């Protein structure tokens, strides 16, 4: 089985040696996305809600380039600059998905200046009929 890289200009382009996603079979391994606007390369705001929504929007763009949607996510990892912002992130997360929710791990992590959240994930193309929106 081979692997292929996924790249789209609709999400922030990596500035280091990694792919936005890698597809193996029907599984998509998504690199972490933050709350950056793809065209301006600037954070969309300083709040956890705005940045979480943008991070999921960026993941949706990469998934689209891979042939999928947020509905295909089976697992996500969420990295928060401050674990006190869990509730704000979780509110947006609840707007993005319905049951059965992707499996999730959430941890506090040191992120870049101004970043409140970074999210990565694993998707299986065509696997889930849930609700997802961006």
Image (spheres, rainbow, N blue to C red):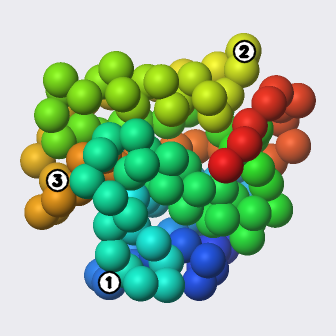
- Point out the tag, 2 or 1, that comes first from the N-terminus: 1
Between 78 and 28, the one lying in front of the other is 78
- Locate residue 62 relative to residue 47 in the image: left or right: right
Q: How far apart are marks 1 and 3 (CA)?
A: 15 Å
Question: Which residue bears the numbered disc 3?
Answer: 111
Q: How crowded is mark 1: few (under 14 residues within 10 Å), some or many (20 or more)?
A: few
Question: Which residue bears the numbered disc 1?
Answer: 15
- Residue 88 visible, this orientation: yes
Residue 22, percent across and down?
58, 65
- Residue 2 visible, this orientation: no
Q: How crowded is mark 2: few (under 14 residues within 10 Å), some or many (20 or more)?
A: few
Residue at 32% over, 67% down: 43
Residue at 88% over, 29% down: 129
Q: Which structural element holds mark 2?
A: loop
Residue at 82% over, 27% down: 130
Residue 91, percent across and down?
47, 24
Q: Quadrant of the N terminus?
A: bottom right
Question: Which residue bears the numbered disc 2?
Answer: 99
Between 77 and 22, the one lying in front of the other is 77
Q: Which structural element holds mark 1?
A: loop
- Locate residue 19 relative to residue 51 in the image: left or right: right
- Point out the tag, 2 or 3, that comes first from the N-terminus: 2
Q: Nearer the viewer, mark 2 or mark 1?
A: 2
């Amino acid at each position: 089985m081979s692997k292929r890289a996924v790249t789209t200009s609709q999400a922030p382009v990596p500035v280091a040696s990694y792919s936005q996603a890698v597809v193996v079979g029907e599984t998509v391994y998504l690199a972490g996305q933050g709350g950056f606007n793809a065209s301006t390369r600037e954070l969309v705001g300083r709040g956890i809600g705005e940045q979480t929504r943008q991070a999921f929007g960026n993941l949706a763009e990469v998934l689209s380039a891979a042939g999928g949607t947020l509905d295909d996510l089976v697992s996500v990892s969420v990295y928060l600059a401050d674990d006190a912002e869990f509730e704000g992130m979780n509110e947006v997360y609840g707007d993005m998905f319905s049951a059965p929710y992707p499996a999730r791990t959430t941890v506090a992590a040191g992120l870049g200046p101004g970043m409140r959240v970074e999210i990565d994930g694993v998707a299986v193309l065509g696997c889930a009929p849930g609700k997802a929106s961006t």
